[in-house]
Image (cartoon, helix red, strand yellow):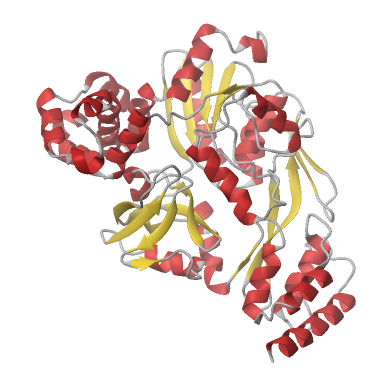
Amino acid sequence: MPFLFVLVLLVGVTIGLQLAPMNAGKDRMFAAADNNRLEEILGFINYNYVDTVNTRRIMTDLVAEYLDREEVIQEVFERLDPHSNYIPASSMRAETESLEGRFEGIGIEFNIVRDTILVVSPINGGPSEALGIRSGDRIVTVEDSIVAGVGVTEADVRRMLRGPKGSTVAVGIRRAGEDQLIPFEITRDRIPLFSLDAAYMVNPQTGYLKLNRFSRTTVDEFTEALDRLNGEGMERLILDLRGNPGGFLFAATQIADEFLSGKKRIVYTQGKASPQEDYFAGREGGFERGALVVLIDEGSASASEIVAGALQDHRRAVVVGRRSFGKGLVQEIFNLGDSSAIRLTVARYYTPNGRCIQRPYEGGTQAYYEEYYDRLAHGGDVSDSVRNLADRGYGIIPDLVIPADTSPDRRAFYRLYNTGRLQRYAYDLYGRDMADIKAYGDPMAFAEGYSLSEADWQRFASGLNLERLNIDAQQLERIRPWTETSMKAHVARQGWQSAGFYPVFNSTDPEFLEALRILNSGEWRSVMGEEG
C-alpha cells in the first residue's frame, strides 16, 4: 500500500508539472489546480530554484523508499541546499518575529539540523546570551526530555522554549570541544529585537559600532548612531559584525552605501530563473572617508558577508577576525495553498569582484554543518592556505586572521562562565551597589572607574566548587582577569544594557584590541591607502 500510494502520488505530480505554466511571472508564483502541497512545492523548485533539479528523478528515488506524504516533503528538501526548507502553517507567524517583532522566551535564533536544535545566534540582551550560550551550540535536552533525534519541529522548539517572562527552563547543551553536556537553567524574559548593540567613542578619534542583525529598523538605528559619533569627532571606526547572522538585503546594501563613495557595486545576485541583478551605492554616505576596520567571525553570515565583502573588494576596510559562515544563497518565501510555505533558494550572492560567498554543500546538510562545528572546535581557520578558499566560495576571508583562543585556561574560563555563577554574582553586585554604580553617569565613566574589590573576589571564589569545574587554585588565579572583566561587563549591562556591556568587555577582547592597534598604528593604510 505505501508503494502504491507514492506511485499514484508520483503520477499526479508528473502530470501537474507537465500542466504547470512555463512562465512563473514577475512574482514567481505557481499553484497546482488542486492545491496539492507536493505539486506546488515541486513546481516552485522546477521554475524558481537556483540550480536545475531533476524533480522527476527525485520522486522516482523516493518511491523506492516507501515514504508517506510528510516524509516525501522533508526528503525533497534534503536533496536541495541546507537553507531551503518547508515551513508549516503553524510556524509562519514566527518566521518574521526575529526581524520585525518581540517575544518572551530564552532569546535564541535556531535551525533544526539533522534532527538537532542548532543555536544560530543568541539574541543580544536576552537571557541565553547573558548565560553564555553561543553560536554553534546544540540543544540536546529540554527539562528531562531528549530533543535530539526524536523528530522535533520548529513549532515544538518554540512551544518548549518560549514562555512567560520569569518562568524557567532547563536545557542541556552539546558544544564543540566539550565532552559532556553543559547544563543551563534559563529564566525567560522579554526579548527586545534591536539591531544596534553598542555605539560609543573608544578614544577621541575612534568610534565603535556593533550590529547584531539586519532588520527593518537597522538602517535608522545605524545612521542615527553614526551621525552621533560623527558629531563627537569620529575619524576612525570599528564596525563589529561578529555573530551577526544577516537579515534583509536592503538593509545590508544601505549600510554598505554609508561607507562607499560614487556608484560602486555592492553585491549582485544570479540564479537559474533569476537574471543577474546588481546593487550599487548611490547616495552620499555618513562615513565615506576615514579609516575603517570590520570585525567578522564564524557567526557572520549572509547580509554581514555582503557588507564585509563589498568593503573588502573596494579596499574600503581592513577585515579582521576569522572566516565568515559562508551563507551566500538568496531565499524567497513562497506561500502554499494550505497556508504553509517554503523557503526556497533562488539565487546566489556575489561580491563586487565576482566571489561567490556560499560554502559548498554537495556533501549534504550534515557535512555542511559539521565543517562549521569543526572550525568552532579548532579556533577557526588559521593557516595561510585559508586564503586560497576565497575564490572557491568559502565565505569572506579576513585580511588579518586571528584564531580563537582554545587554550586550557580559556576553556577553563568558559566552564566557569557557563555555570552562570559569574553572571548571578554580577547581578548581586549591581543590586547591592546600584546607587554607586549609577552615580558614574555613563558606561564609559563606569568602565574607567569601577573595579571589583579583593573582598568581592574572594567571596565569589570561595563559593566555587573548583573540583567539579576541573579548575585548580592556580588556574583560577590565571583566569581571574577574564573573570573579573566579564563580571564587570555584566554589572554594566544591568545599568546600561548592551551600551554598558561592550565598553567593558572589549577592553580584553583580542579581535577588538587588534582592530584598535591597526587604527592607532596607521597599518590600515597598507590596505585602504592614505585617504581610506
Q: Nearer the viewer, residue 216 or 471?
A: 471
User: Is the C terminus in the top left, top right, bottom left or bottom right quadrant?
Assistant: top right
User: Is the N terminus in the top left, top right, bottom left or bottom right quadrant?
Assistant: bottom right
Q: Is residue 520 above or below residue 157?
A: above
Q: Residue at x 57, y 73 (%)?
A: 89
Q: Is residue 344 above or below residue 258?
A: below
Q: Is residue 96 above or below residue 71?
A: above
Q: Position of residue 298 (x, y in %)?
A: 55, 38
In the rendered structure, the answer to whether residue 307 lies left or right of residue 497 reads right
Q: Nearer the viewer, residue 90 or 77?
A: 77
Farthest-out residue, bottom: 1
Q: Position of residue 36 (x, y in %)?
A: 72, 81
The image quadrant that residue 487 belongs to is top left
Q: Residue at x 67, y 55 (%)?
A: 364
Visible residue check, residue 338: no
Visible residue check, residue 446: yes
Q: Position of residue 200 (x, y in %)?
A: 42, 25
Q: How many marks?
A: 0
The image quadrant that residue 73 belongs to is bottom right
Q: Residue at x 43, y 31 (%)?
A: 406
Q: Residue at x 10, y 33 (%)?
A: 459
Q: Position of residue 391 (x, y in %)?
A: 75, 32
